[in-house]
Amino acid sequence: MLFLVLARKSYLRNLQYRGAHLVHNIASAIFGFIYISIWTGIGQSHTLGEYGIDGMVAYIAFNQASLWVTTFINNGLGIQQSVRTGGIAIDLMRPVPLFYQLMCKEWGQIAYQFIYKFLPIYTLYIFVLPLQVPTSMLTFLWTAVALALAAFISICINFLIGAVALWTMESGSLFWVNYAFSMLLSGFLIPIEWLPGWLRFISHASFYPFLHYVPTRIYLGMESPWTLIGSLCWGVLLLCACLLATHLMRRRLEVQGG
Amino acid sequence: MKWLRMYKLLVIASLRSRMQYKFNFWLTAAMTALVSVVEFLLLAVILTKFGHIKGWSLAEAGYLYATLTISKALYRSLASDVHHLEKYLVSGELDNLLLRPIPVLLGLMSQNFSFRIGEFLQGIALLAICMRMLFLEGQLTWAAIPLTVVVIGSGALLLFGIGLLTATIGFWLTRIEQLQNITEDAARTAVQYPLTIYPRWMQGLLLTFIPVAFASYIPSLYIIRGQGGLWLIAASLAVAVAVFGLGLLMWRLGIARYQSTGS
C-alpha cells in the first residue's frame, strides 16, 4: 500500500519535532484566544444571533483547532522547493502520479497535526473555556467526514498553488493570500451570514465555507450533514483541476538548479 | 554616520540582488498588501455590523491597527533578517557576517532587504481615512499628526527591540521560530485590538512581560481618546528605548557566546 507507506513516513518525520510543535501550540492557542476575546468583547453589548456568547466561543474555538487540519498544511505541498532544487523532474518521473504521491504524504502530515495540534489545542480550550461537547456519536462521525473533505479540498488548492511555481518560480505568497481569503470567506472568524452582501455572495460561490463554516456548524449541531454534498462536489471539481494541472506541468517542466 | 552610510550601501546592494527577480519582488509586495487589507477587512466587517467593540469605533480601531501596521513594516524593512536569525544560526551562515568588517547586527539588518511597500501603502491609506473620520468628529486636533509620527517611530523601535530580544535568545536555544510566534506574531496581533477586550492577566502580560501594548494602544489612548496625558507618549517612548537598549545588551552577550554550527 503506497498510500500507507508515504503517509506513515511523513507522519514519522513530523514526529521528530513534536516538542517544538507543542510549544507552537501555545502560540496557536493564544491566537484563538484573541479571536474569542473579540467576540466576548462585542457580546457584552450585543446579542450574537443564534449563537449567543457561548455559541460564538465554541464556534471560534473549534475553528482555531481545525485550522491545523484544514488550512495549515504544507505550503503548496512543497512543490515550490522542488522546483527550485530541480527535484520536481524526478518527482514527475516517478511511476506514481505527482498528485497522488504528494497527497499521500500530506495525509500523513494531517494525521500528525490532528493528533499533536488539533487535539491538544481543543483539549486546552475545553478546560479553560465554557465549551459544550456534542453528546451524539453521529455528530462526531459527520464532523470527521466534514473535516476530512475540507482537508482534501485544501490539499487540492495547495497542489494548484504549488503548480503555479512551475511558471513563476515563486508561489509561497499565494499560500498566504489563500489563507487571508480563507479567514474572511470561510466563516473562520465571522459566521458567513454576518458578512456584507457582496462578500456573502463571493463566499457562497466559493469552496471556502466548506473549510470551516460547514464542519464547525455540523459539530455544533446547527447544520444538517446533507450540506456535505457541497464539499463532495467541490472535492471532485478540484481533483479534476489538479489532474489537468499535472498534465500541463509535464509539458512545462524546466529544470532549475543542480 | 559611517555606519549609516555603510548600511545604506549594503541595503542598496541587497535591493539590487532582489530586483534580479523583479516579477517575484512585485508579486510578493502585492500579495502581502492584499493579505494585510483582508486582515483589516475582518475587523471592519465586525465593526460595521456591531458598531463598536468595548466603546471603540471603527475609526478608532482602524487608527490602532494602522499605526501598528506601519510600525511593523518599518521594523521589518529596516531590520529584515533579524527576524530570521534562526536560519543563520542553524546553517552557520552567521560566520560569513562575523568575518565582515562591520558590526554583525548591521550586517544582519541589511541582508535580504525587503521593502514592505504593500504594508506601508495599506497602513498609510487606512491611517489617513481613519484620522480624517476622527477629525470630522472633532476627536483629533492638528497636534495629532506629529504625535502619530512619533508613535509610529517609537512603535517600530519597540517592535525591533522585542524582535531583537527574542532573536538573541537564539544564541542559547538555536531554534526560536516558535518563540517568535508567541512574542512577535501573537503579541502583536493581540494589540491590534483594544486591550480592554482581554482578561486582566492577559492585559498585564502585554503591558509588562511583552510590553507590546506600548507600541500603539497606550499612546492612542491619549491621542484619539484624550485619556491620561502627554506622559503616556513619553512613557511609550521610554519603554521602547529601554527594551531596545536591553536588546542590544543581550545581543552583545549572546554573540560572545556564539558557536558555529553547520559545515
Image (tube, rainbow, N blue to C red):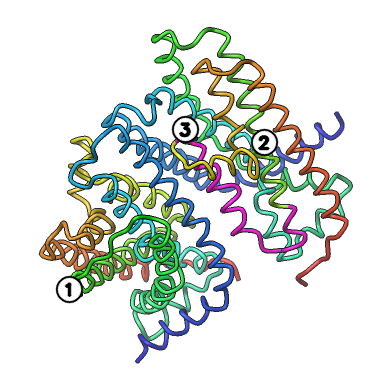
Which amino acid, mark 2? Leu
The residue positioned 26% from the left and 34% from the top of the image is A46
Left or right, B238 with respect to B99, comes to: left
Q: Could you say which quadrant of the image residue A38 lies in?
A: top left
Instruction: Say whether residue B185 is magenta.
Output: yes
The residue positioned 46% from the left and 41% from the top of the image is B198
Disc 1 sits on a residue from what chain?
A: A
Q: Mark 1 = which residue?
A: A138
Q: Mark 2 = which residue?
A: B158
Whether A245 is drawn above or below A194: the answer is below
Labels 3, 2: one chain: yes
Alpha carbon separation for disc pair 3 and 1: 40 Å
Q: Could you say which quadrant of the image residue A221 lies in?
A: bottom left
| Crowding near the residue tagged with mark 3, few <14, some 14–19, many ≥20 C-alpha atoms within 10 Å | many
Alpha carbon separation for disc pair 3 and 2: 18 Å
Query: In which quadrant is the C terminus of chain A drawn?
Result: bottom right
- Measured as percent of width and height from the top left, residue B47 is found at 32, 31
Which amino acid, mark 3? Pro
Disc 2 sits on a residue from what chain?
A: B
- Measured as percent of width and height from the top left, residue A207 is found at 23, 56
**Which tag is nearer the camera, tag 2 or tag 1?**
1
Instruction: Say whether residue B239 is magenta.
Output: no
**Contact (CB < 8 A) between labels 2 and 1?**
no
